[in-house]
Amino acid sequence: MVKERRGRTRVVVDPVPRWYRSPKDSGFALYVSIYLHCRRFFDTMFWKFRSQSKERKIPVAHAIPVGRRVYAIGDIHGRDDLFSQIIDMIRTDNLSRSQAETTLILLGDLVDRGPASAEVVERARLLKNEFPDTRLLIGNHEECFLAALTGSVRRLRYFMRIGGDATVESYWKDSGCLANASFEDVAARLPTLVPQSHIDFLNSGEDYIEIGDYAFVHAGIRPGVPFERQSLTDLRWIRDEFLDETSDHGKIIVHGHSITAEPDEQANRIGIDLGAFQSGCLAALALENDQRWYLFAREARS
């Protein structure tokens, strides 16, 4: 239901006290007139200066520094087949262009839901061998995965409820044995099955990355809060408060976490989580100077 907004009465306060008024004294009236004109002039200049000092200049075209090229990959969620394909596409695209300092950014949620989380983590871990400036953002699913590796049964239960059962299976290998295992059994054994190199890699992830006029996060940001004061909960979990915000964030926010059928380009953000685990399509956003384009890895349909 839409409520009618009532109009508010504006109260105008006379800047000249009554005791200033003296119609019999023409000289005094002239003084008052000069006073009013001066006050209006200085009031106008004050507010004009104040508004200009707070004005934020928005660039005509968002860009990254000259000589750099960035590829940001959306939520992979255990689809190593699509991950392998998108890396091949990035490699080909990068080689077809002029030489540049190339950065790969994984927007988080490497694991869960898809069938090959262990393989995805291993492939991501080794990317630095080919692309030295590969950077990982920690998503909410990495957060829950690492929490489940502490041996806590409660945290394991939650992790498996949000798609972590597929990740456990990818490390467990023996699905028959897993089917008969209790939560207590899984909580105790899983930490011994995940290589320390995988744990170290996931723990090395970042929370946000800024390059030029772009900022990269997993889920989004809390509108109106500076980057350095953003909470980890918001950076990894936020949804509607961020997605519904239309004001300028100071930078274009590139994010995953919230699934759309195609890249979600808005004036203040770009979402590239296409739900790869169920849609069979994984997206990468490419940036160079003030240009941007997309690459898409798609599963073969019979």
Image (cartoon, grey):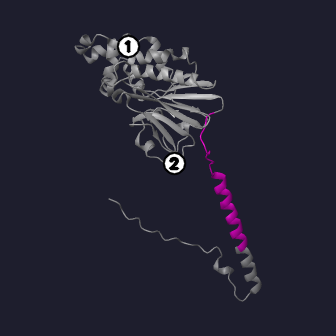
The answer to whether residue 84 is visible is: yes
**Residue 191: mark:** 1
- At label 2, counting other C-alpha atoms closer than 10 Å, the crowd grade (few under 14, some 14-19, many 20 or more) is few
- Say left or right for 40 vs 1: right
Q: Residue at x 55, y 14 (%)?
A: 129
- Say left or right for 276 vs 161: right
**Residue 71: mark:** none
For the record, the magenta segment spans 37-64
The local secondary structure at tag 2 comes to loop
Q: Is residue 30 above or below residue 159?
A: below
Question: Could you say where residue 54 lies in the image, as x and y percent from the top left?
Answer: 63, 52
Question: Could you say where residue 245 lies in the image, as x and y percent from the top left?
Answer: 46, 46
- Say left or right for 247 vs 166: right
- For the stretch drawn in magenta, the main secondary structure is helix
Let me know if residue 49 is in the magenta part. Answer: yes
The answer to which image quadrant residue 178 occupies is top left
Mark sitting earlier along the chain (2/1) = 1
Residue tagged by mark 2? 247
The answer to which image quadrant residue 210 occupies is top right
Q: What amino acid is at disc 2?
A: Ser
Which quadrant: the C terminus?
top left
- Say left or right for 182 vs 168: left
